[in-house]
Image: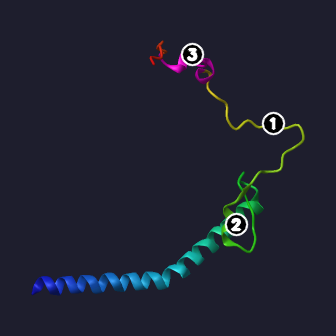
Amino acid sequence: MELLKILAIFLLVFYGLKYLFRLLMPFALRKMTERLMHKAQQQQSAGGSRTYYTTGGNPFDQFKQQTPPKKEGEVRVDYVPQEDAKAKKGTQTAGEFIDFEEIR
């Protein structure tokens, strides 16, 4: 009998919390996105960061990064391959070759 009572209390608490989260999460997410947008706008106006965010009607547009404006003649390298990757080409990385004859 005690097991059924504990199980019933557990289920009531579980479904109660589930219902509350369903009601409260949209408000919490809206507040969180407003804070993130405000923080991004402050960083953009201060110019202290190299990450540039777009602003618009959609709150998720802030996560789209734009490339910063470049000066003419400026070159930026994002990735430099290692020398080991260039040296291993052709038959060195192909594996073992076995001669065979086709039998009909």
| Magenta-drawn segment | 84-96
Numbered label attached to residue 39: none
Q: Amino acid at mark 2?
A: Asp
Q: Which residue is mark 2?
A: 61
Q: Tell which circle, 2 or 3, labels the residue nearer the N-terminal end.
A: 2
Compared with residue 51, is residue 9 higher up or lower down, i.e. above or below?
A: below
Query: How far apart, in angstroms, are the residues tagged by discs 2 and 3?
Result: 48 Å
Asked if the magenta segment contains residue 44, the reply would be no
Towards the viewer: 2 or 33: 2
Q: Is residue 78 left or right of residue 90?
A: right
Residue for point 15% across, 85% down? 4
Query: Identity of the amino acid at label 1?
Result: Val
* Residue nearest the observer in this picture, 97 or 33: 97
Dot 1 falls on a residue whose secondary structure is: loop
Tell me which residue sits at (59%, 24%) in the image: 85
Query: Tag 3: residue type?
Result: Thr
Task: Answer whether labels 2 and 3 touch (C-beta < 8 Å).
Answer: no
Residue 48, compared with residue 22, is above or below; it is above
What residue is drawn where x is 37% and y is 82%?
Answer: 17
Q: Position of residue 50 (x, y in %)?
A: 72, 51
Q: Which residue is mark 3?
A: 91
Category of crowding for the residue at label 3, using alpha-carbon neighbours closer than 10 angstroms: few (below 14), some (14–19), many (at least 20): few
